Image (tube, rainbow, N blue to C red):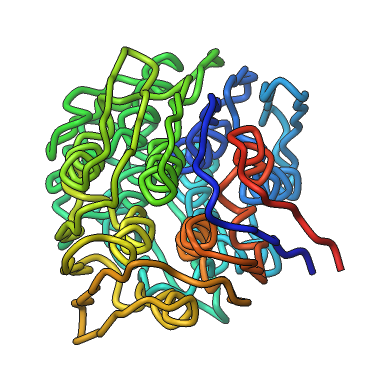
Amino acid sequence: MDRLSIHGGVPLQGEVEISGAKNAALPILCAALLTADPLRLHNVPDLKDIATALRLLKQLGVESARDNAQRVEICAQTVSSLEAPYDLVKTMRASILVLGPLLARFGEARVSLPGGCAIGQRPVDQHISGLEALGAEISIEHGYVIAKAKRLRGAVIRTDMVTVTGTENLMMAATLAEGTTVLENAAREPEVVDLANLLIKMGARITGHGSDRIVIEGVPALHGAEHTVIADRIEAGSFLCAVAATGGEIRLTHVAPDTMGATLSKLAQAGLTLALGSDWITAQMKRRPKAVDVRTHEYPGFATDMQAQVMALNTLAEGTGIVVETIFENRFMHVQELIRLGADIEIDGHTAVVRGVVGLSGATVMATDLRASASLVIAGLAASGQTVVERIYHLDRGYSHMERKLSQLGAQIERLTA
């Protein structure tokens, strides 16, 4: 099992290119099921989750080809199966995103209940109730969601909570429904907007994306399109946390600063000097960071996917930072591993009190989920001595060759293969 070895204490210097967003690419790949025509996609990141999604689509009969330039051509002209099996779905929760497209285009789907990171229950009941409102008949049998509908019908759907994948699933399903669908309390994330922009290129009629009220007028069929996936705001934020923790100066390219407002604001409060362009960010850190308080919230609030990375920064900061997690109930599993590196953190329910220490010291730590992995890498980059991060298959799900990119910035980091 691969692990990372990090010799910390080295300031980061140089330039790195940010990859396409995992959380945008996954629903976009699933959108291929909505048409018999090919999609030509650019800036698709090289990640384990992307490979899993392509394997799942292949299982359904979808053909795809990709090259080293992050281009993917995918075509669902022939779909030979309407079942997403447990052995693939269990490793990635986003697999539920095939449910809406299959049901909308083919009138039925059988999708295993999903798995993924163990950071919370993340139930799919909002997906199911929304599809039922569109006229689907749904049952759950032997761990599978079984859905049927001759043709979906437009409806007004207000989810009980803001759900990104729920919004995406229902939006895709509604593109081929008869009549108009209104999604109230919709997710506003940039990744939802990117999916909507692709669907519009495919012939869908969608307005309001980027707000909490999305209106979709159903059409009889969608066609092929070409699309470039947006930059990964979480990867970009993680690299900014890294330079804030280690010191130094870096430049990020192929990035979307306009999607990163909450993260950039907190890092500026921490003392990171930032300069922004339309698709680049430079960041410089010359001092010990200042502690910042964060409270996770749906976009445009502070992203839960950045909580662990900012907590790692707070462990080294001057002062005390309060971190409140409001999205997932189990998203403090990295705390005990940070404590192994010398961090001073106390947890009370959904709140973590992080008292900054002057320095961390290297140790062997274990990644528990995707973003926890990044927090441990950041802490290891700043710690004295050697840090070994085990179970980095979590990291590979969402960060494209992170150790290579950090090496470009001067970090002493290498992947060890057992």
The structure residue drawn at horizontal position 62% and vertical position 19%, both measured from the top left corner, is: 37
Q: Position of residue 342 (x, y in %)?
A: 43, 78
Determine whether 274 is above or below 379 in the image: above
Q: Position of residue 404 (x, y in %)?
A: 69, 40
The structure residue drawn at horizontal position 23% and vertical position 74%, both measured from the top left corner, is: 355
Q: Position of residue 312 (x, y in %)?
A: 37, 62
Q: Residue furthest right?
A: 418
User: Which of these two is toward me, 140 or 282?
Assistant: 282
The structure residue drawn at horizontal position 47% and vertical position 65%, both measured from the top left corner, is: 372
The structure residue drawn at horizontal position 57% and vertical position 81%, both measured from the top left corner, is: 142
Q: Which image quadrant: the N terminus?
A: bottom right
Query: Total number of numbered labels?
Result: 0
Which quarter of the figure has residue 180? top left
Mark yes or no: residue 156 visible.
Answer: yes
Q: Which image quadrant: the C terminus?
A: bottom right
Determine whether 116 is above or below 212 in the image: below
User: Which of these two is toward me, 193 or 9?
Assistant: 9
